[in-house]
Amino acid sequence: MHNTLTKRLRAGMALVFAAVIAVTFSCTSVEEQPTLDENALFKKAFLEELENLQFPTDPNARANNAMPSVQVTLAALRATDNWVPAVKDRATVFMATDEAYALMDITPRNVNQNLDLVMAAIGNQVISGKKFSGNQLLEIQGEANLLSFLYDAPTSLTVQDENGQLVLHDVFGQSANIIRTDFKATNSVTHFIDKVLAPQFPAPPTE
């Protein structure tokens, strides 16, 4: 799976998040753009919230599912700032757990060696500009994700109810169970999934 990331992806992932600034940011002029200090403060607060997860009762969660650990994602987010504007405006984030990353032999200790793949997966699992709470997830039907800003052929996410289990699907034919919902930060909502949806390139053709 590691070999599926092309040079184009590695070179362009920063463009994904940079493009989102122009597309989804509510600011309309240079003077209105947030300062680096404001972004840094948001990043610090967002990561602190992730480190101190508090979940509401979640009927969709597996009965014996422990509180998910997301140290891989936290390490990756600490290593880069490109994601901040995309999440700061409004976003729906589907976050893979450490258990899911472990299936790919990615751990907090080696995340820096796999940073391109982790950030690509995050880009594939985020809907920028919209917040879908747990009771709205079935409204996600072909919603463009961050990767859609990088490729001419749109990439998107869809949620389906499969025998009572909410399942997230991407355009690469991959799926993951949604195991926890409704971690709410200031401007975004995060749901947790049991599989890493790393994009499989080349991207699907435009219909």
Image (cartoon, rainbow, N blue to C red):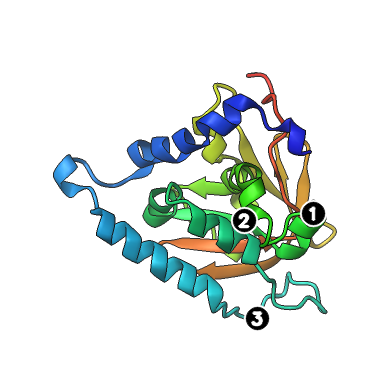
Identified by mark 3, the residue type is Thr
Residue 63 is situated, as x and y percent measured from the top left of the image, at: 81, 78
Marks 3/1: CA–CA distance: 31 Å
Which residue is disc 1 drawn over?
Answer: 105
The image quadrant where one finds the C terminus is: top right
For marks 1 and 2, give the one nearer the viewer. 1
Q: Please state which amino acid type lies under the numbered disc 1.
A: Asp
Find the residue positioned furthest to the left. Answer: 31
Disc 2 marks which amino acid? Phe
**Of residues 49 and 177, the one drawn nearer to the viewer in this rendering:** 49
From where the camera sits, is residue 200 visible? yes
Disc nearer the start of the sequence (3/1): 3
Q: What x and y, as percent, mark residue 78?
A: 49, 59
Q: CA distance from mark 1 to mark 2?
A: 20 Å
Q: Is residue 92 above or below residue 51?
A: above
Instruction: Name the one closer to the observer, 65 or 143.
Output: 65
Q: Quadrant of the N terminus?
A: top right
- For label 2, the residue is 94
Determine crowd level at label 2: few under 14, some 14-19, many 20+ residues with C-alpha closer than 10 A.
Answer: many
Q: Earlier in the sequence, mark 1 or mark 2?
A: 2
Rendering quarter of residue 177: bottom right
Kindly identify which residue carries mark 3.
57
